[in-house]
Image: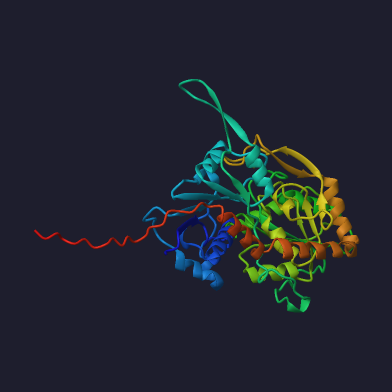
Amino acid sequence: MNKPSFVISCPFDTYSGYGARSRDIVKAIIESDKYDVKLLPQRWGDTPTNFCTDHKEWKFLWEHSIKNLESKPDVWMQITIPNEFQAVGNFNIGCTAGIESTGCDPTWINGLNQMDMNWVSSDHSKKVFEEFYFEQKNPQTQQINVIKLQKPIHTIFEGVDLDVYKYLKPSEVTLDLNSIKESFCYLFVGHWMQGDFGHDRKNVGATIKYFFDAFKNTKSPPALILKASTGRNSYMGREALLDKINVIKKHYKKSEKLPNVYLLNGNLTDKQMNELYNHPKVKAMVSLTKGEGYGRPLAEFCLSKKPIIVSGWSGHMDFIDPQNCIVLPGRLENVHASAANKWLLKETQWFQVGSKNAIDAFKDVKNKYKNYIVGGKKQGFKIKSEFDFESMKKLVIEKLNIIPDLPQQIKLNLPGLQTPKL
């Protein structure tokens, strides 16, 4: 009997968070060996493509690609934002990272309700979608209807590939950071997105300022490494980021001595990223993010067994243990108009860490680093044992088993008919 057809529309060949999510989900479904998997490749905004061509271990995905949907699949999945969800198959699954704030555009709820089942990356996203609702007035009857999530929703975390992300001894790291003179560096990884100072989603501007405030005019200060981009790596994008850093510097007096900030801009392979995490000069990761659907770089960094300074709210708190990491308190505040867009609404809220808490954390990790080593090791073990790819794959297969038995085409063997004699 033929396997049920499973068609997945997703940006699997892009250098993006959704690209990484797509590759993992697709690989898990293929390895379940239950379906005939086909892929409809999609773009993801302005992010670069050709990821699978550049990474030979992922080239096999192109063997599953198709150009068009020729027939109705048994199972249909879309890995994208929910407003794009459409029910195309006999059974339909929507897969999205979710939302970074406390609410979403109403079209996202409508999209989720188009599908038979929905997957999100974190319990934070699941809770937002389950609790969010809006009122809609019928133009004919003037009756007000409450629109809310009606379809099942499940958390499928983003498992770390332990073959790629793992602890390395200093002697195993070949990545060249010789241009960085400091031996103690904090690392930030992420896009520097739209928003005025202190209002971009990853909170990069405030991260730099709090770092400056913590170590200005100090002897032998640490450095901050920004592995950042504007979303698409280019010369102009790099210059834009350097300009933003210089604008922050101008808020300080010329007589004040500021610690160094280094910008790493450009694509690194997964192996190079793992070496960056494990580099002996990188002592800790910092993320003062306002909101995450999951926070994949944080999970990957944990395998280096080093301390993490992180905001205490949203998707990453599924895997961050406050007993192992430096989790910063703060408050919820409205999304600033400069950061809002048609999907991230200014009427919703996200997190702002306390400035003093962030500054104190920077100082404490530098001055009392040995106190945080054990916590880093415990957090690394938590990811390795609970949030790896194989654990994620088991969860994927478990949720696929919920799909009801689909009708199968079978060949009919009819008995031969004898022609009556006249």
Residue 206 vertical position relative to residue 176 in the rendered view, above or below: above
Residue 2 sits above or below residue 117 on the image: below
Viewer-side residue, 422 vs 330 = 422
Q: Is residue 256 visible?
A: no
Q: Nearer the viewer, residue 65 or 297?
A: 65
Please name whichever residue, 240 or 122, is drawn nearer the observer in this view of the structure: 122
Q: Is residue 399 left or right of residue 218?
A: left
Residue 330 is situated, as x and y percent measured from the top left of the image, at: 80, 43
Furthest residue in direction bottom, as rendered: 171
**Which residue sits furthest top?**
141
Q: Residue 386: image x %, image y %?
A: 72, 61
Quarter of the picture holding the C terminus: bottom left
Where's residue 68, x and y in %?
Answer: 39, 57
Taking the spot 67% from the left edge, 67% from the top edge, the residue there is 273
Q: Position of residue 405 (x, y in %)?
A: 49, 54
Q: How many marks are shown on the rendered structure?
A: 0
Q: Nearer the viewer, residue 60 or 344?
A: 60
Q: Residue at x 24, y 63 (%)?
A: 416
Left or right of residue 126, residue 27 in this image:
left
Which residue is depicted at the point 50% across and 46% down? 85
